[in-house]
Image (cartoon, rainbow, N blue to C red):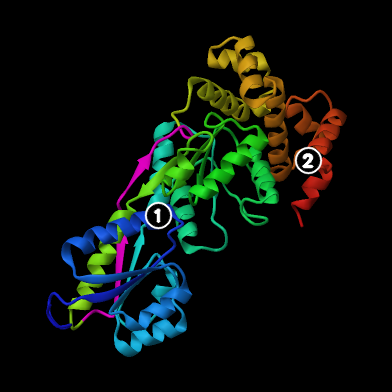
Amino acid sequence: MKTEAGSHAIRKVAVALKLSDASWRDFLTGFFDYAKRRTHWDIRVVQSAVELEQTAPFCQGIVTGLKPSSRVLAACDRKSVPLVAVGADWALKRKNGSIAYIRNDNKDIGRFCALHFQKLGKFASAGFVPSNGDDDWSAARERGFLGCFRNMVKSTYHPVSEPGSDKDINALAHWLKSLPKPAAVMAAWDMRAIHVLSACRLARQKVPSQVAVIGVDNDPLLCDFSTPPLTSVAPDHALEGQLAAKTIDRMMRQRSVSRKTHILNTAKKMAERESAKPISPVTLLITRALAFMYSHAEENIKADDVATALGVSRSLLDLRFREFRNETVAKAITKARLDAVKKLLANTGLSIRAITAKCGFANPNHLKNLFRRTFGVSMREFRISLLR
Protein backbone atom coordinates (compact mmCIF):
# COMPACT_ATOMS: atom_id res chain seq x y z
CA MET A 1 0.00 0.00 0.00
CA LYS A 2 1.28 3.47 -0.81
CA THR A 3 1.66 6.23 1.73
CA GLU A 4 -1.06 8.73 2.56
CA ALA A 5 0.43 11.11 -0.01
CA GLY A 6 0.32 8.49 -2.76
CA SER A 7 -2.24 8.36 -5.51
CA HIS A 8 -3.73 5.14 -4.06
CA ALA A 9 -3.69 6.18 -0.42
CA ILE A 10 -6.69 5.05 1.60
CA ARG A 11 -8.56 8.17 2.66
CA LYS A 12 -11.23 8.28 5.30
CA VAL A 13 -14.39 10.02 4.05
CA ALA A 14 -17.43 10.82 6.18
CA VAL A 15 -20.84 10.94 4.49
CA ALA A 16 -23.57 12.49 6.66
CA LEU A 17 -27.20 12.13 5.54
CA LYS A 18 -30.63 10.79 6.53
CA LEU A 19 -31.10 7.29 5.16
CA SER A 20 -34.80 7.44 6.09
CA ASP A 21 -35.37 9.57 2.96
CA ALA A 22 -35.45 7.79 -0.41
CA SER A 23 -33.66 10.71 -2.06
CA TRP A 24 -30.64 10.25 0.22
CA ARG A 25 -30.59 6.50 -0.37
CA ASP A 26 -30.46 7.18 -4.12
CA PHE A 27 -27.73 9.76 -3.50
CA LEU A 28 -25.69 7.20 -1.57
CA THR A 29 -26.10 4.67 -4.40
CA GLY A 30 -24.54 7.13 -6.83
CA PHE A 31 -21.82 8.05 -4.34
CA PHE A 32 -20.79 4.42 -3.82
CA ASP A 33 -20.98 3.74 -7.56
CA TYR A 34 -18.27 6.35 -8.15
CA ALA A 35 -16.23 5.42 -5.07
CA LYS A 36 -15.97 1.68 -5.71
CA ARG A 37 -14.74 2.20 -9.29
CA ARG A 38 -12.32 5.08 -8.86
CA THR A 39 -11.09 5.51 -5.31
CA HIS A 40 -9.45 3.93 -2.29
CA TRP A 41 -11.65 5.21 0.50
CA ASP A 42 -12.73 4.13 3.93
CA ILE A 43 -16.29 5.52 3.90
CA ARG A 44 -18.11 6.20 7.18
CA VAL A 45 -21.86 6.84 6.76
CA VAL A 46 -23.41 8.77 9.67
CA GLN A 47 -26.96 10.02 10.14
CA SER A 48 -26.72 12.83 12.68
CA ALA A 49 -24.67 15.92 13.43
CA VAL A 50 -23.49 14.27 16.67
CA GLU A 51 -22.15 11.21 14.82
CA LEU A 52 -20.47 13.50 12.32
CA GLU A 53 -18.75 15.41 15.12
CA GLN A 54 -17.37 12.13 16.48
CA THR A 55 -16.18 10.92 13.06
CA ALA A 56 -14.92 14.12 11.42
CA PRO A 57 -11.57 14.46 13.31
CA PHE A 58 -10.33 11.24 11.68
CA CYS A 59 -11.37 12.07 8.10
CA GLN A 60 -9.61 13.57 5.09
CA GLY A 61 -12.90 14.60 3.46
CA ILE A 62 -16.52 15.21 4.43
CA VAL A 63 -19.72 15.05 2.35
CA THR A 64 -22.79 16.20 4.24
CA GLY A 65 -26.47 16.81 3.75
CA LEU A 66 -26.70 17.80 7.42
CA LYS A 67 -25.48 21.05 8.92
CA PRO A 68 -22.22 20.30 10.77
CA SER A 69 -21.64 21.68 14.23
CA SER A 70 -19.35 24.66 14.74
CA ARG A 71 -16.73 22.25 16.10
CA VAL A 72 -16.69 20.24 12.88
CA LEU A 73 -16.41 23.36 10.76
CA ALA A 74 -13.62 24.73 12.93
CA ALA A 75 -11.73 21.42 12.64
CA CYS A 76 -12.14 21.47 8.85
CA ASP A 77 -10.68 24.97 8.74
CA ARG A 78 -7.82 24.10 11.07
CA LYS A 79 -6.84 20.89 9.25
CA SER A 80 -7.76 22.10 5.73
CA VAL A 81 -10.22 19.23 5.35
CA PRO A 82 -12.35 19.71 2.20
CA LEU A 83 -16.11 19.65 2.64
CA VAL A 84 -18.90 19.03 0.14
CA ALA A 85 -22.30 20.37 1.27
CA VAL A 86 -25.31 18.86 -0.51
CA GLY A 87 -28.45 20.97 -0.81
CA ALA A 88 -27.45 22.90 2.31
CA ASP A 89 -28.16 26.62 2.11
CA TRP A 90 -25.89 27.41 5.06
CA ALA A 91 -22.91 26.54 2.84
CA LEU A 92 -23.55 29.52 0.58
CA LYS A 93 -22.90 31.87 3.50
CA ARG A 94 -19.72 30.15 4.64
CA LYS A 95 -16.51 32.05 3.86
CA ASN A 96 -13.83 29.87 5.43
CA GLY A 97 -12.35 26.57 4.36
CA SER A 98 -12.33 24.56 1.16
CA ILE A 99 -15.99 23.93 0.37
CA ALA A 100 -18.12 22.83 -2.57
CA TYR A 101 -21.89 23.32 -2.67
CA ILE A 102 -23.98 20.84 -4.71
CA ARG A 103 -27.72 21.03 -5.12
CA ASN A 104 -30.57 20.22 -7.48
CA ASP A 105 -31.91 23.13 -9.54
CA ASN A 106 -35.05 23.59 -7.46
CA LYS A 107 -36.50 26.46 -9.45
CA ASP A 108 -36.18 24.36 -12.59
CA ILE A 109 -37.90 21.45 -10.82
CA GLY A 110 -40.88 23.77 -10.32
CA ARG A 111 -40.82 24.82 -13.97
CA PHE A 112 -40.54 21.19 -15.06
CA CYS A 113 -43.65 20.32 -13.04
CA ALA A 114 -45.60 23.28 -14.48
CA LEU A 115 -44.71 22.34 -18.05
CA HIS A 116 -45.91 18.79 -17.42
CA PHE A 117 -49.27 20.07 -16.19
CA GLN A 118 -49.55 22.29 -19.26
CA LYS A 119 -49.05 19.23 -21.46
CA LEU A 120 -51.95 17.53 -19.70
CA GLY A 121 -54.45 20.24 -20.65
CA LYS A 122 -55.86 23.58 -19.63
CA PHE A 123 -56.29 24.05 -15.88
CA ALA A 124 -58.35 26.76 -14.19
CA SER A 125 -55.91 27.23 -11.29
CA ALA A 126 -52.45 26.32 -10.05
CA GLY A 127 -51.65 25.70 -6.38
CA PHE A 128 -48.42 25.05 -4.49
CA VAL A 129 -48.08 23.27 -1.13
CA PRO A 130 -44.73 24.08 0.54
CA SER A 131 -42.63 22.06 2.94
CA ASN A 132 -42.61 22.66 6.65
CA GLY A 133 -40.92 25.97 7.48
CA ASP A 134 -39.13 28.55 5.39
CA ASP A 135 -36.97 26.18 3.36
CA ASP A 136 -35.17 27.93 0.50
CA TRP A 137 -35.43 24.86 -1.73
CA SER A 138 -39.22 24.77 -1.29
CA ALA A 139 -39.53 28.49 -2.03
CA ALA A 140 -37.44 28.06 -5.19
CA ARG A 141 -39.72 25.26 -6.40
CA GLU A 142 -42.74 27.47 -5.71
CA ARG A 143 -41.29 30.35 -7.76
CA GLY A 144 -40.45 28.08 -10.65
CA PHE A 145 -43.88 26.43 -10.61
CA LEU A 146 -46.26 29.36 -10.20
CA GLY A 147 -44.12 31.61 -12.41
CA CYS A 148 -44.96 29.47 -15.45
CA PHE A 149 -48.71 30.09 -15.31
CA ARG A 150 -50.37 33.17 -16.83
CA ASN A 151 -53.94 34.50 -16.78
CA MET A 152 -55.23 32.04 -14.21
CA VAL A 153 -55.74 31.77 -10.46
CA LYS A 154 -52.47 31.01 -8.61
CA SER A 155 -52.37 30.18 -4.92
CA THR A 156 -49.94 28.99 -2.24
CA TYR A 157 -51.18 27.07 0.78
CA HIS A 158 -49.92 28.53 4.05
CA PRO A 159 -49.54 25.84 6.77
CA VAL A 160 -51.50 26.49 9.95
CA SER A 161 -50.00 23.68 12.04
CA GLU A 162 -47.65 20.70 11.90
CA PRO A 163 -47.77 19.20 8.37
CA GLY A 164 -49.88 16.06 8.32
CA SER A 165 -51.77 16.86 11.52
CA ASP A 166 -55.58 16.79 11.54
CA LYS A 167 -55.65 20.59 11.68
CA ASP A 168 -53.31 20.82 8.71
CA ILE A 169 -55.29 18.32 6.61
CA ASN A 170 -58.55 20.15 7.39
CA ALA A 171 -57.01 23.48 6.35
CA LEU A 172 -55.60 21.88 3.21
CA ALA A 173 -59.05 20.51 2.36
CA HIS A 174 -60.59 23.98 2.74
CA TRP A 175 -57.88 25.50 0.54
CA LEU A 176 -58.28 22.83 -2.14
CA LYS A 177 -62.05 23.39 -2.29
CA SER A 178 -61.43 27.11 -2.90
CA LEU A 179 -59.31 26.50 -6.02
CA PRO A 180 -61.12 26.86 -9.36
CA LYS A 181 -61.38 23.48 -11.05
CA PRO A 182 -59.64 21.68 -12.58
CA ALA A 183 -56.69 22.58 -10.35
CA ALA A 184 -53.01 21.73 -10.89
CA VAL A 185 -51.34 21.24 -7.50
CA MET A 186 -47.62 20.76 -6.90
CA ALA A 187 -46.32 19.70 -3.50
CA ALA A 188 -42.76 20.53 -2.43
CA TRP A 189 -42.00 16.83 -1.89
CA ASP A 190 -43.75 13.48 -1.93
CA MET A 191 -44.84 13.32 1.72
CA ARG A 192 -46.49 16.72 1.35
CA ALA A 193 -48.25 15.41 -1.77
CA ILE A 194 -49.57 12.47 0.28
CA HIS A 195 -51.06 15.04 2.66
CA VAL A 196 -52.72 16.73 -0.33
CA LEU A 197 -54.27 13.44 -1.45
CA SER A 198 -55.63 12.90 2.08
CA ALA A 199 -57.11 16.41 2.03
CA CYS A 200 -58.70 15.72 -1.36
CA ARG A 201 -60.50 12.70 0.07
CA LEU A 202 -61.69 14.76 3.04
CA ALA A 203 -62.93 17.56 0.76
CA ARG A 204 -64.45 15.08 -1.72
CA GLN A 205 -62.30 16.47 -4.51
CA LYS A 206 -61.79 13.89 -7.24
CA VAL A 207 -58.19 13.14 -8.25
CA PRO A 208 -57.15 13.81 -10.96
CA SER A 209 -60.33 15.13 -12.64
CA GLN A 210 -60.86 17.98 -10.16
CA VAL A 211 -57.42 18.21 -8.52
CA ALA A 212 -54.32 16.83 -10.25
CA VAL A 213 -51.36 16.32 -7.89
CA ILE A 214 -47.60 16.02 -8.46
CA GLY A 215 -44.91 15.54 -5.80
CA VAL A 216 -41.11 15.53 -5.89
CA ASP A 217 -38.50 12.80 -5.24
CA ASN A 218 -40.36 9.76 -6.61
CA ASP A 219 -40.17 7.80 -3.36
CA PRO A 220 -41.63 4.42 -4.46
CA LEU A 221 -42.82 3.57 -0.95
CA LEU A 222 -44.99 6.70 -0.96
CA CYS A 223 -45.84 7.06 -4.64
CA ASP A 224 -46.73 3.49 -5.60
CA PHE A 225 -48.94 2.81 -2.58
CA SER A 226 -50.79 6.11 -2.26
CA THR A 227 -54.43 6.44 -3.34
CA PRO A 228 -54.30 7.13 -6.21
CA PRO A 229 -50.64 6.38 -7.03
CA LEU A 230 -48.69 9.63 -7.05
CA THR A 231 -47.06 11.26 -10.07
CA SER A 232 -43.71 12.68 -9.01
CA VAL A 233 -40.74 14.63 -10.35
CA ALA A 234 -37.66 12.42 -10.03
CA PRO A 235 -34.47 14.47 -9.67
CA ASP A 236 -31.42 12.36 -10.48
CA HIS A 237 -30.22 11.96 -6.88
CA ALA A 238 -27.85 9.16 -7.91
CA LEU A 239 -26.11 11.53 -10.32
CA GLU A 240 -25.98 14.08 -7.52
CA GLY A 241 -24.20 11.46 -5.40
CA GLN A 242 -21.72 10.78 -8.19
CA LEU A 243 -21.05 14.52 -8.52
CA ALA A 244 -20.44 14.77 -4.78
CA ALA A 245 -18.03 11.80 -4.84
CA LYS A 246 -16.17 13.18 -7.87
CA THR A 247 -15.91 16.61 -6.25
CA ILE A 248 -14.59 15.42 -2.87
CA ASP A 249 -12.16 13.15 -4.72
CA ARG A 250 -10.79 16.09 -6.69
CA MET A 251 -10.64 18.30 -3.60
CA MET A 252 -8.68 15.70 -1.60
CA ARG A 253 -6.25 15.04 -4.44
CA GLN A 254 -5.45 18.62 -5.34
CA ARG A 255 -3.05 20.63 -3.29
CA SER A 256 -4.59 23.94 -4.32
CA VAL A 257 -8.38 24.01 -4.33
CA SER A 258 -10.84 26.82 -4.97
CA ARG A 259 -12.25 27.91 -1.62
CA LYS A 260 -15.84 27.78 -2.83
CA THR A 261 -17.40 25.83 -5.71
CA HIS A 262 -21.10 25.79 -6.66
CA ILE A 263 -22.35 22.79 -8.68
CA LEU A 264 -25.93 22.57 -9.99
CA ASN A 265 -27.57 19.23 -10.85
CA THR A 266 -30.32 19.72 -13.46
CA ALA A 267 -31.02 16.07 -14.40
CA LYS A 268 -34.58 14.87 -13.71
CA LYS A 269 -37.55 13.03 -15.21
CA MET A 270 -41.28 12.69 -14.56
CA ALA A 271 -42.54 9.44 -13.04
CA GLU A 272 -46.15 9.37 -14.26
CA ARG A 273 -48.87 7.69 -12.23
CA GLU A 274 -52.61 8.12 -11.66
CA SER A 275 -52.68 11.40 -9.67
CA ALA A 276 -52.01 13.54 -12.76
CA LYS A 277 -53.50 12.48 -16.06
CA PRO A 278 -54.52 14.29 -19.27
CA ILE A 279 -57.67 16.32 -18.71
CA SER A 280 -60.73 14.29 -19.71
CA PRO A 281 -63.38 15.51 -22.19
CA VAL A 282 -65.79 15.90 -19.25
CA THR A 283 -63.35 18.15 -17.40
CA LEU A 284 -62.79 20.19 -20.53
CA LEU A 285 -66.56 20.58 -20.93
CA ILE A 286 -66.92 21.92 -17.39
CA THR A 287 -63.91 24.22 -17.81
CA ARG A 288 -65.37 25.67 -21.00
CA ALA A 289 -68.77 26.08 -19.33
CA LEU A 290 -67.26 27.97 -16.37
CA ALA A 291 -65.23 30.18 -18.70
CA PHE A 292 -68.41 31.08 -20.59
CA MET A 293 -70.28 31.81 -17.35
CA TYR A 294 -67.60 34.18 -16.05
CA SER A 295 -67.09 35.98 -19.35
CA HIS A 296 -70.86 36.54 -19.71
CA ALA A 297 -71.79 36.97 -16.04
CA GLU A 298 -73.03 40.53 -16.62
CA GLU A 299 -75.36 39.51 -19.46
CA ASN A 300 -78.19 37.77 -17.57
CA ILE A 301 -77.36 34.36 -19.10
CA LYS A 302 -79.33 31.19 -18.32
CA ALA A 303 -78.32 27.54 -18.15
CA ASP A 304 -79.77 26.97 -21.63
CA ASP A 305 -77.48 29.71 -22.98
CA VAL A 306 -74.42 27.89 -21.61
CA ALA A 307 -75.51 24.55 -23.11
CA THR A 308 -76.17 26.16 -26.50
CA ALA A 309 -72.78 27.90 -26.51
CA LEU A 310 -71.04 24.58 -25.82
CA GLY A 311 -73.09 22.60 -28.30
CA VAL A 312 -74.44 20.08 -25.76
CA SER A 313 -77.84 19.31 -24.30
CA ARG A 314 -79.00 21.03 -21.13
CA SER A 315 -79.60 17.65 -19.46
CA LEU A 316 -76.04 16.47 -20.19
CA LEU A 317 -74.55 19.71 -18.86
CA ASP A 318 -76.61 19.46 -15.66
CA LEU A 319 -75.56 15.82 -15.23
CA ARG A 320 -71.84 16.62 -15.56
CA PHE A 321 -72.03 19.51 -13.09
CA ARG A 322 -73.80 17.35 -10.52
CA GLU A 323 -71.28 14.52 -11.02
CA PHE A 324 -68.07 16.54 -10.91
CA ARG A 325 -68.95 19.70 -8.95
CA ASN A 326 -71.86 18.60 -6.77
CA GLU A 327 -73.88 21.63 -7.91
CA THR A 328 -76.31 22.64 -10.65
CA VAL A 329 -75.47 24.76 -13.66
CA ALA A 330 -77.80 27.45 -12.30
CA LYS A 331 -75.90 27.57 -9.01
CA ALA A 332 -72.58 27.89 -10.87
CA ILE A 333 -74.01 30.79 -12.87
CA THR A 334 -75.13 32.47 -9.64
CA LYS A 335 -71.57 32.17 -8.27
CA ALA A 336 -70.20 33.76 -11.43
CA ARG A 337 -72.75 36.60 -11.15
CA LEU A 338 -71.86 37.22 -7.50
CA ASP A 339 -68.19 37.47 -8.44
CA ALA A 340 -69.19 39.96 -11.14
CA VAL A 341 -71.15 41.93 -8.51
CA LYS A 342 -68.05 42.12 -6.30
CA LYS A 343 -65.97 43.41 -9.22
CA LEU A 344 -68.56 46.07 -10.07
CA LEU A 345 -68.77 47.17 -6.42
CA ALA A 346 -64.99 47.42 -6.29
CA ASN A 347 -64.28 49.01 -9.65
CA THR A 348 -67.30 51.18 -10.50
CA GLY A 349 -69.58 53.73 -8.89
CA LEU A 350 -72.74 52.01 -10.12
CA SER A 351 -75.65 51.92 -7.73
CA ILE A 352 -76.82 48.64 -6.22
CA ARG A 353 -79.99 48.86 -8.33
CA ALA A 354 -77.92 49.26 -11.50
CA ILE A 355 -75.64 46.37 -10.55
CA THR A 356 -78.68 44.21 -9.82
CA ALA A 357 -80.08 44.77 -13.30
CA LYS A 358 -76.69 44.42 -15.00
CA CYS A 359 -75.98 41.03 -13.44
CA GLY A 360 -79.44 39.57 -14.05
CA PHE A 361 -80.83 39.36 -10.51
CA ALA A 362 -84.56 39.62 -9.90
CA ASN A 363 -84.51 42.64 -7.58
CA PRO A 364 -82.09 44.56 -5.33
CA ASN A 365 -83.41 43.07 -2.07
CA HIS A 366 -82.93 39.51 -3.34
CA LEU A 367 -79.34 40.33 -4.34
CA LYS A 368 -78.62 42.09 -1.01
CA ASN A 369 -79.77 39.06 0.98
CA LEU A 370 -77.89 36.60 -1.24
CA PHE A 371 -74.71 38.65 -1.09
CA ARG A 372 -74.78 38.82 2.72
CA ARG A 373 -75.49 35.07 3.06
CA THR A 374 -72.63 34.25 0.70
CA PHE A 375 -69.91 36.67 1.83
CA GLY A 376 -70.95 37.55 5.40
CA VAL A 377 -71.17 41.32 4.77
CA SER A 378 -73.62 43.63 3.05
CA MET A 379 -72.88 45.07 -0.38
CA ARG A 380 -72.51 48.53 1.17
CA GLU A 381 -70.13 47.23 3.86
CA PHE A 382 -68.06 45.45 1.21
CA ARG A 383 -67.72 48.62 -0.87
CA ILE A 384 -66.81 50.74 2.16
CA SER A 385 -64.17 48.21 3.27
CA LEU A 386 -62.32 48.74 -0.01
CA LEU A 387 -61.97 52.47 0.73
CA ARG A 388 -60.15 52.00 4.06
Secondary element at tag 1: helix
In this rendering, the label closer to the viewer, 1 or 2:
1
Q: Is residue 93 left or right of residue 365?
A: left
Disc 2 residue type (three-letter): Phe
- Please give the name of the residue rendered at 43% of the width and 34% of the height, measured from the top-left corner: 273
Q: Which residue is mark 1?
A: 23
Q: Is residue 380 above or below residue 5?
A: above
Q: Decide: few, some or many residues near mark 2? Use Cα within 10 Å; few <14, some 14-19, many ≥20.
A: few
Query: In this rendering, would 80 be left or right of 368?
Result: left
Give the Cα distance between marks 1 and 2: 45 Å
Residue 165 belongs to magenta span: no
Q: Amino acid at mark 1?
A: Ser
**Res. 280 mark:** none
- Residue 291, placed above or below residue 127: above
Q: Residue at x 65, y 13 (%)?
A: 304
Instruction: Please provide percent x and percent y for residue 303.
Output: 67, 17
Residue 154 seen in render? no
Q: Which disc, if any, is residue 375?
A: 2
Q: Which residues are magenta?
A: 257-276
Horizontal side of 199 relative to 256 (left or right) equals: right
Q: Position of residue 209 (x, y in %)?
A: 53, 28
Relative side of 346 to 235, left or right: right
Say which residue appears at 78% left-offset and 52% top-offset. 385
Q: Is residue 349 visible?
A: yes
Residue 248 appears at what percent x and percent y? 26, 71
Determine whether 151 is above or below 100 in the image: above
Q: Are marks 1 and 2 in contact (CB under 8 Å)?
A: no
Residue closest to the eye, 192 or 263: 192
Which callout, 1 or 2, points at the residue further toward the start of the chain? 1
Q: Nearer the viewer, residue 148 or 219?
A: 219
Q: Position of residue 311 (x, y in %)?
A: 53, 12
